[in-house]
Structure formats: structure tokens, C-alpha cells
Image (cartoon, rainbow, N blue to C red):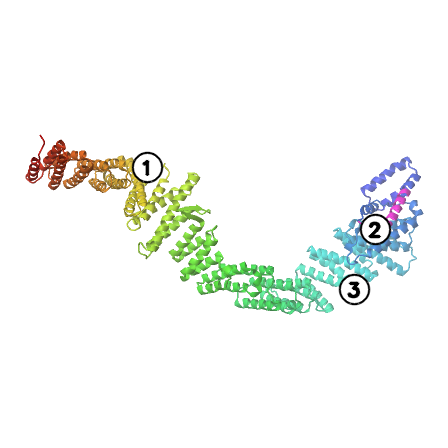
Amino acid sequence: MWMQFLFFRLQYPLQPSYLFEVLQYYPLIAREMAPAQLQRSDKDRRLRSILSFAADLQAQLPLVFAKPPGSLFNDVQKQILTFPNNLGPSATAKCEEIDSNGTTLWNICTRLRRTYDSEKPQDVPVILLITRVFAFLLLDCALESGKSTIANLVRLMKIGIKAAKNCIGMNQTDLALKVLEKLGKYELLLKNPDGQSSRENVEVHERLVAEYYVLRTALAWHQDQLEMAEHMFKKSMSSKHFFDPGTAESLADVLYEMGKDLLVKQQYTMAVKWLDRAYQILIEQELDRLSMDASELRISIVESLIKALLGIQDQESADKARSLVDFLENEVGDKLIVLLLRLDLLSATTNESFDSNSYSDILRRMTRTVVLTEPNFKLIMYHIRKLNERSPGLACKALDELLRLRILQAERDEWVEKVIITRLWMTTNQRDTPDVLELLEEVLSAILESLGQPISSAVTLAAHTLLWKRIESNYTQGQYDAAERWCRLAMHRIFEKSGELNMARISRKLLLCALAKQDTNSARDTFASMSDTSKNEPMTRFLMYKVAIRCGDVDLAADCLRIISSSSSKDPTLLYACVLDAQQVGNRLLALMALQLVLEEQFVLKNHSFAASSTVHLPSLLRSTISLTSAVLNGSKDTEGSPEAEANVEKLCKFFEGAVTDMKKTCLSIQASETIWTIPELDWFSKNSYNLAVKHLSIWNPRHSLRMLICCIAFIDQYPKDLAETVSDDLSLRKMFCEFSAAIALVALARGEDLIENQLQDYLTLRKHVSSFDNLLQEKLEKLEGGPKQDLLQKLAVLLGFDFEASCKLKAWDDLSEIIIKAASCNSPRVYELMADCILSSQAPTQVLVTSLKKIVNESWTLESLNSTKLGKYMRCLFQVALTDSPGIAEQLLDQVHSLASEASQTDHPYPSDELEWIATRAFNHAVDLYCSEQDDACKTWAGKAFNIAHLCNDDGALERTLQGKFLGLKWDA
């Protein structure tokens, strides 16, 4: 037994596992320990197991299609992998049973396999394939065990070839190899028969051997062993003269698959080699004896061979490919395959010129002759696109002909839509000419007429995408006429389902083209054709705004601004663009209107303050708006005080006041280093508010000037405290000038105000400005000298006069003395005159009036700048008031008048005589009144003072004598 095993194994190349088995047997031989009976018992058990499994498999196999095979597949596979090579006498005894089981299994698989399409072997369950292999192994075992007749050998050769072919077809190369290894033994037996076989049997044997080598060739190819495939092919060709049509067809099919695979891998030379072999094998057969499949196979071989020849890209191969195409055309006529190969020939031409006309002619032949199925439609479209790469004009004509002759007649909307997109794609990639667009428009109109309705929205979107790219390209390059023509095409009625947004976008591009060409009439026509919704889109209105300001239509421009503003509350970009465009055109009014709308929409303007609703840089926006407003105001033809001018001034004030409010709020909420109100911003706003106020102080309403000055003060107060001394001094002076000017404006407003409440409020505000000016001046007074110092003191004197007036109006009597004292440092007689006039015209209490007026007179007299006339007037008024309410004070005033008049008599400006005469007469009359009221002592005192004053009159003592005479006429009690 072991000798048989060793002899069998050494006939074939030993694998490591087999060598191990042999080495296992060697010690057994040497020791003679294992009896032959034990080995036979094991083989008997193994054979019974195989037969039992075969019987179970026969019962289970038909049921695997009703439920999943489960473990059956793995069991069959395990049996194949572990199938013994030689069962010896055990198998000989049951040779018939083994053969019967193998035959039964094979027939069951054959019957079950018939339920599947024979043209789709890949759909057959793998369980049937491996069961066939298992059945073949059973039959092979039976053959080796006793049924080794030539007939049985031929039978098993046919079964093995079929099993191996199925395995290769299902790409089960391991199983195929196992089967073919078994068939390799039969090949030797068939080539060396017993000498009693007939010639007919010999031919059968040779064909089976040839088929065996065909399968070995296919297996080597599947295993990427081309050298082995070459060797096996040559062996198969050694029996070529015995080939029947089936064998030749089978070999040609294998060689075709090999060549086709090499063609896919672009190994063109090798592909030509194997495909040519396949072709030669078939043409050597009688065509009428080949099957119908063989005819199709031959055409497929020729097709692949032509493609492989063209892939080599030399003239010889191209000529050979052309001759094959001619041969094929003569044989099958003007079929699709021939036309396609003709196209491949033209595409693969080795010379530089491409015969576009011939390519186009073939496409037109295809259009007329080919049955229009989905694959054929895609095929024709592919070649039309390929022609478009060489000759766009011919490609468009070919596509138009396909559309007209076949597509529209087929009533396949999806094909029509694909043709439309392809036609647009080809046209958009051509050079712009009016003829091209006119032809395309005719095509679209023909399609619309045939369909009777617009194309779907999805296809329209794709079409508009292509058209939009061309529109944008032309517009970017400045080809506005061409861009306009493409826009008109995009608005064709066939694209009605594009949606309002897309149509609006195209209309806006037309507006842009009209603007670029300065064709405002065309722009207006386009705008008029748009829907109401599209008209009121912000971008549409922006473009019409540009049109309006270029044709001077202010109403349309204003309307556009209004709509843009209402639609752009979160993004002011379009309003900024309106400002910029208006400035470029030179229309300041519209630019200003746009800027103001930005402020109104982006910032809630209320009570002269801005509440930011966006991230717009407010200082920059305000600067632009203020500058433009100021420019419009200066360049306006409107007279000062007109409603238009007043409105602009009012806006200026609101802008500055809004800036102040935002500045204060921002600086409170964030750190100084992060504020947008930087020193340069403060410089700009403080200087411009001051300059505007001072420049128009005599022109504007004082209230507007006051508001501007208050804003300037607020900006100055916001500067950091750590500035350089020179900068700080400049700011301090500017603030003082603002305080001074504000006070002037306030006194003018207060004096002209009819409402007492408003008047008093103005006076109260005035006093604050005066106080601020005074404080600033006191801080700087020590540093000042000369002219600047005197100038500021004079300004203070004026302000103190206004402050005195305001105090009188506000009845702040206690503050009058302090104001009079402050005025002393100003060295200004005029301020005392103003104070005196003011106190005299006020409704001050007598005590206040007398006290204040006395201080005014005393301070004025100290300055030696008060003339005697004024002095006399003030003393007279003071005496008159005091005489009525405070006789004691009036009596004191008589002494003061006498003293002043005595001093003045020694100067060049004596006390006015008429004033002395009036006071003396009035004092004497009061003495008489005292006499009548029996106040003799007081009467005598007053009379004496009257005589003293009358003595100083410049009348040579006439008044004095008169008064004394009258006094002597009085009768006194004893």
C-alpha cells in the first residue's frame, strides 16, 4: 500500500505536505509495525463517510433554493478539499455505488441549473458549482477504482471539461485547477489508446484533449500566467486539424476574453496577438457550421481587434484596422457597429488633420438608421460631443438634425431636455456671432412648438447655469452687446419655469449692460417688463437708482432710495453704494439723501441720539454725512433762512448731537483703549462743530448755533486728561470761546423769547456757561499776559454783564454782589453801566437795588472812568428809590452825593448842576414833609443836607438862598 502511495506521489511534483506524509511512512516500513488491515479499515470508514455525505447531499440539494444553504456549502467545500486521492480496495468493492452517487449528484445539479438563464452563468448559485466538482471527484474515484474503460474515460473527460469550464466562468480558479489536474491524467490515456479505437474515436479524443488545453490556456490567463497560457495554446493548436466548430468556438471565446482583458489594460500589442488568434481560429471554420453565437463572437472579436490595432497608433496597424472595418462592412452592411468603428478610425487618425466632415457624415447616417434606444441615444450624443471638440459648427448641425428627425418624433421629454442642455453647452463654448445665437433661438422655438410647454424647472436651472457663465464672461470682458443677446436668449419662453428670482437676476444683468452702454431708455424698458416683486428687490432698485441719477429723474431716484432703505435695515451696503455712485456722478443731494437713510435705518435716531443696530462705524458714517451736508448747504442756491436751508442746518445739529450721545454711551460701556471715539475723531468733530457754529453765528438761528457749540464743548470734555500741555491749552481756549459764544447766543434767545418758562431756562443755561468760562479763565490767568489776557478779561466782563442780567431775571438777588465784585478784575467801566441799567430796570427789592447800585457806583468811581453825568443819573435814581422805601438810606445818599460833588468840583468834570439842583430840591421837599408831620428834628437835618448840596450848584447860590428863605418862613413851636 505504501509503495503504491509513494509511486503515485512521485509522478507529480511533491508539495511540502506530501513530503511530510512520505516521511511518515518511512519509519513504518522500517519497523513493520502497522498492519495493512488497519489502513484498510480507515479507508473503509472514509469511503462510507463520503458515500453517506453524497446521499445526504442528494436529499438536501433541491431544498437549498427554498431556504439559505447554511452550513451545507461549507460541508461540500470541506469534502472537496479533503477528498482522498486513492481509496484502494475499499473503493474497488463499491465502484458502482460511487459512480452512481456521482452521476446522481451531477444530474441533480444539471436539472436545478436549468432554472437559471444560460446566458448569465454568474446568477447560478455557487453551491451547484461546487457540488458538480464533488460529483466529478466521485466519478474520478470510481474510474480509478475499476471503471477505467475508454468510454468511461471519455465520459469523465467531458464531465471534467464542463465542470472546469463552469469553475473558470465563475472565477473559481482553485476548483478549476483541481479538476484540470485530474483531467491531466486522462489526457495522457486518451493520447495513448489501446490501439483498437476507430478513427472517429481518435478524433473525439483529440478534440477533448484540445478542449482540455483550451481550458488550461484560460486558467493560465486567469492566473496572470501569460507564458503558461502561450504554452497551453500551442498544445491546443497541435490538434487544430481535429477541431470541430464547437471546440473552435470555445477556444476563440477564451482567446477573445484574454484579448479583451489586455485591451482594457491598454496592452495593445498583446491584445492584438490574442485577438488575431481568436479571429483566425473562427475564420478557418465553415461559417454555416458555426452557431449563432459564433457569428456575434466573430464580430466582437473584430471590433476589439480593430480597437487594439488603433491603440498601437502606427500607420501599419491603422491600415490593417481599416481593412478589417471594410471587411466587416461588406459582411454586415451599414450596421451600428460598423459606423462606430468608422468613427474610431477617424478619431485615431495618425495625421494631424481630422476629417470632421466624414465624422459628421457618419453621425448623420447613424441618426437616420439606428434604432433609437436609450443606449444608442447616449452613444450618438457621446460622439456628437466628441465631434464638438474638433468642429463645433458641424457638431451643432448633427445635434440639430438628431433633434429634428428623431428626438422630437420619439416624444421622449428626457431626451429633448438632454439635447437642449448639450446644445447650450456646445454653443456657449463657441465664439460669439449673431448667426450662432439666431440658430440656437430657432432651435429652442422649434422645441417649444413641438412640446407645447416650457421645459422642467430642473432642466431650466441647468440651462440658465450654462447661459449665465457665458453672460458673465461677456460682461466681464466688456462685451455688453453680446452679454445682452445672451440675456435675451436666457429669457426665451421655453425657460418660463426658471422662477422669478432667476428671471430677475437676468433682467438686472440687462440693466447693467444698459448702464454700461449709457442706454437709459433700454434700461427703463427692461425695468418696465419686470414683475412688481422683481422691481422692488433692493438690487433692482439700486440699478434703477443709478439709471435715475444719470438721466436726472430725481423722483425715481428718491423712490428707489426709499425702497432700498426699507429693505436693507440690516445691511447698509447698497445704501453706501448709492452714496458713492451719487458722488461719482456729482449729485450731492442724492448722495446726502442716501447717507441720511443709512443713519435712519442703521441707527435709531431719537432725541438727538443714535442707538446702533449694526456694526457700522458710526463716527466715519457721521463724518461723511456731515461733510456732505455742509457742502450741500454751502453750495445751495437757497437763501439763508429758507425752509430747505433750515432743514439742512437742523440735520447738521442732529448729526452732531447724535455723535455726542453715542460717544458718551460708548465711553461708559467699554474701555478707553477700545473706543471708536479716538482722539483724531474727537479732533474732527470738535473743530468742525466749532467752525460751523462760529462761521454761521450771525446767519443761523441762534438756537442752531448754540446746539453746535454745546456739541463742541461735549467733544472737548471727552478728551483724555493726560494730553500734552500745548494740546490741553488749545482745547481749553477753544472751550472758552465756545462758552463765550454760547452765552451770547443764549442771551439773544432769552431776550427774544416770549414764553417766560423758556426764557428763564435760557438764562439759567447762560449762567452755567458764564461760570464755566470764569473757572477756565481763573485756571489760566496766571499763565496769560498781554493781549490775550486782556482779551479774555474783556470777554469775561461781557459775560458777567449777561450773568448779572440773568441773575436779575431769575431773581437771584444774593448773587448780584458777587458778580459786581468779579467784574472788578475786568477793569471794564462798560460792564458797570450795563449792570446799573439792568438793576434799575429790574424789579429788585429796594434794599437789593440800593445795595447793588451803591456797589456799582463805588466800583465805577474807583476805576475813575465813570463820568459825572452818569454818576449824577445813578445817584438821582438811587436817591429817588431810597427816598420812597428807605428814608434812612436816602439820607446817607445825600451825604455821599455831597461828598462826590465836592470832589468833582476840583476836577475838569464837575458834578452835573441840574442833578444837584434836583436832589437838593427833592431833599428840601422831604424836609417840609417831615415838618408837616411834626418831625422837627428830622426836618432840620434834611433841610441842612439840602442846603449843603444846593451850595454846590453852579447858580451863584440862587437855589441855596431860595431854600433858606423858605425854611425861615416855617413856624416852630416854642
Which amino acid is tagged 1?
A: Glu
**Residue 856 is drawn in which quadrant?**
top left
Q: Is residue 825 left or right of residue 582?
A: left
Residue 244: name its quadrant.
bottom right
Left-right relation of 102 to 960: right
Judge whether residue 841 can be spotted in this image.
Answer: yes
Q: Main secondary structure of the magenta part?
A: helix
Q: CA distance from mark 2 to mark 1?
A: 108 Å
Residue 567: image location, x then y, percent: 48, 54
> Could one spot residue 468 in this view of the protein?
no
Measured along the vertical axis of the image, is residue 357 above or below residue 121? below
Which numbered disc flags the more N-terminal residue, 3 or 1? 3
Q: Magenta span covers which residues?
A: 44-67
Q: Secondary structure at mark 1?
A: helix
- The crowding category of the residue bearing disc 3, from other C-alpha atoms within 10 Å (few below 14, some 14 to 19, many at least 20), is few
Q: Is residue 149 magenta?
A: no
Q: Quadrant of the C terminus?
A: top left
Dot 2 falls on a residue whose secondary structure is helix
Give the residue number, with chain letter if any, for mark 3: 292
